[in-house]
Image: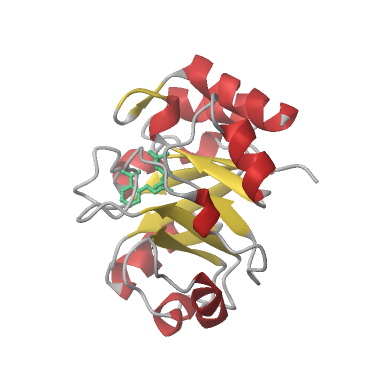
Amino acid sequence: MRTRVKICGITNKEDLAAACLAGADAVGFVFYPPSPRAITIEQLLGFIETIPAFVTKVGLFVNESPEVVKETARVLKLDLLQFHGDESADYCQQFNQSYIKAVRVKPGLNLIQYAKEFKNASGLLLDAFVPGIPGGTGEKFDWDLIPTNLDLPVILAGGLDDLNVAEAIQKVKPWAVDVSGGVERQKGLKDHQKIFAFVNAVNQA
Ligand SMILES: O=C(O)c1ccccc1NCC(=O)[C@H](O)[C@H](O)COP(=O)(O)O
């Protein structure tokens, strides 16, 4: 099975083109103003039309109002929603659109129960837990905390890069991997060589 790749935190046309050219299956846009990778609808409207076929457009939100999520998804024609806050399953389902639920993994969290609660999600994104930071931490977490029998496709995130992603795939065997910081030259700006190296490492894993 080929491990899918999502490159997250895209903020400009050039980084988007590099992610698509490298072979990303999905690109993520962060609609969370405190993030150094945050982007607005107006900014993204300037280049979202350059995304070619077969690259999934993912919008990321953190405890956002339903009105803002609906408007963002409508205007940008987002393919997939990704929720990184304390959103309930009912909240996530109200948009009648495929979604990924992100969960920040720490010891004692019942991921099997979590997957049952979000059984209608298209994937469960497993990320590092860092107090006060909903995502994009650049931190790994203990992959041994991931049960082997989760009922949802696992999207592994958190501190991945081209040097550790092969080990992550061999250990966790996720449906997909997701990266932001590990392919950057500075927060919010991607390093195109790192993007290509990451995708190549995934494909060789
Ligand atoms: O990337 C962010 O700044 C961010 C901020 C708030 C919520 C989510 C965010 N990113 C979500 C992602 O899917 C990241 O790719 C994921 O957390 C992994 O990030 P990294 O550890 O930097 O690879």
Left or right of 11, for residue 165: right
Query: Residue 116's x, y, as percent?
Result: 56, 80
Residue depicted at 68% across the width and 40% down the height: 170
Measuring from the top left, give residue 191's x and y in whole percent: 43, 19
Left or right: where does residue 141 sit relative to residue 121?
Answer: left
Question: Where does ligand 1 appear, by image quarter?
Answer: top left
The residue drawn where x is 66% and y is 32% is 202
Residue 68's spot in the image, x, y percent?
Answer: 30, 66
- In depth, the one of 123 and 44 nearer the eye is 123
- Residue 25 visible in image: no
Quarter that holds the C terminus: top right
Query: Across the whole image, how many numbered discs are drawn on residues?
Result: 0
Q: Which residue is more in the foreground, 16 or 188?
A: 188
Q: Which residue is at 35% across, 74% downward?
A: 87
Judging depth in this view, the residue of 146 and 16 nearest the camera is 146
Residue 6: image quadrant is top right
Res. 181 image quadrant = top left
- Residue 134, compared with residue 192, is above or below; it is below
In the displayed image of the protein, which residue is found farthest to the right?
Answer: 1
Q: Residue furthest bottom?
A: 90
Residue 90: x, y in percent? 44, 84
Q: Is residue 147 above or below residue 196?
A: below
Name which residue lies at 33% across and 54% down.
129
Horizontal arrangement in the rendering, residue 25 relative to residue 97 (left or right): right
